[in-house]
Image (cartoon, rainbow, N blue to C red):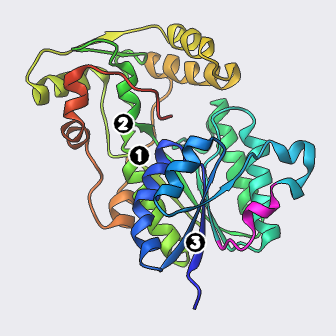
Amino acid sequence: MEPTSVLVVGAGGAVGTALADELLPDHEAGRIRLVATARRPESARRLRERGIEVRRLDLDEAETGGLDAVLPVFDGIERVFLLTGYDVRMLAQSKAAVDAARAAGAAHVVHVGVNAAPDTTIVHFAWHQLVEAYIERSGLGYTHLRPSAFMQSLRLGVEQPGVLTHFVGDGRPNWVDVTDIAAVAAAVLRDPAAHAGQAYDLAAESASPHEIAALLAEVTGRPWRYRPAEPEVFYRRMTAAGGDPVYLACVRNVFERTRNGTLTDPPITDHIERVTGRPATTLRAFVLRNRELFDSGEALSPAR
């Protein structure tokens, strides 16, 4: 009997890389056939070195070449993990991926969206909800994953040792480790029937940047302080680096509204523990696991 084929769309990103780590033992044991998509040669090389089949996928090519331009990537695939880029093109990209998956005969899609209120007015949160609605009407089996802010993004705010910069004032966002997102996704992809039609809100805990700075001080044993910054600073910095202005204006709005108290995250659930069978990764556990990085004060690119 042939192993079940699983396609990871977005395997080069933080969540996709962690998902490949989760599923690789299943792939090596012959329980699944793991296939990953990549656009950049270096990402494809790293995946192939791990024994993973790689297929080149650029979902933007569906606009100029029709669905046939991307359909071969989904050939023979039964289950799809879908995480598209963070800009307005995600709407058309996600639609093309869902349409291609359906046309190729896939049975189930696991989509990564965002943790938000059903009646959210945050623009890019609404994009995710529109994608979810399209998946639900596609006829495919589906499971929605709705993560909160990535803990990995905290490292973007470490611009100098002992200083954590963020843009939400005294707000207390929800946080999740991308390895937990990957663990939930892997559990669903192994047994989609048990999770069909479900939506999982993924967060471990709420914490303000003040609280996180205090935690960093406690874990690293040296002083840390929180330096609040204006959301406009984030917007200008990220657009200057080539980020999509429409998407980044949405993120700026999230920071502004979190800071002024007009936006709060949904209540935290036990979905991570319920799906994976282990507790969600706390901020303390995340910092302990990455202590060397925080000790050095080195900053990394954002994961979200």
User: Which residue is tagged 1?
Assistant: 178
User: Which residue is tagged 2?
Assistant: 151
Q: Nearer the viewer, residue 172 or 304?
A: 304
The kind of residue on which mark 1 rests is Val
- The earlier-in-sequence mark between 1 and 3 is 1
Instruction: Give how far apart the Cα atoms at labels 3 and 2 are.
Output: 27 Å
In magenta, the rendered stretch is: 70-78
Q: Are marks 3 and 2 in contact (CB under 8 Å)?
A: no
- The earlier-in-sequence mark between 2 and 1 is 2
Q: Which of 204 and 235 is in front in this view?
A: 235
Figure check: 76 above or below 258: below
230 relative to 223 in the view: left or right = right
240 relative to 172 in the view: left or right = right
The kind of residue on which mark 3 rests is Ala
In the image, what residue occupies the spot 41% across and 58% down?
A: 21
Q: Which mark is residue 196?
A: 3
Q: Nearer the viewer, residue 123 or 11?
A: 11
234 relative to 224 in the view: left or right = right
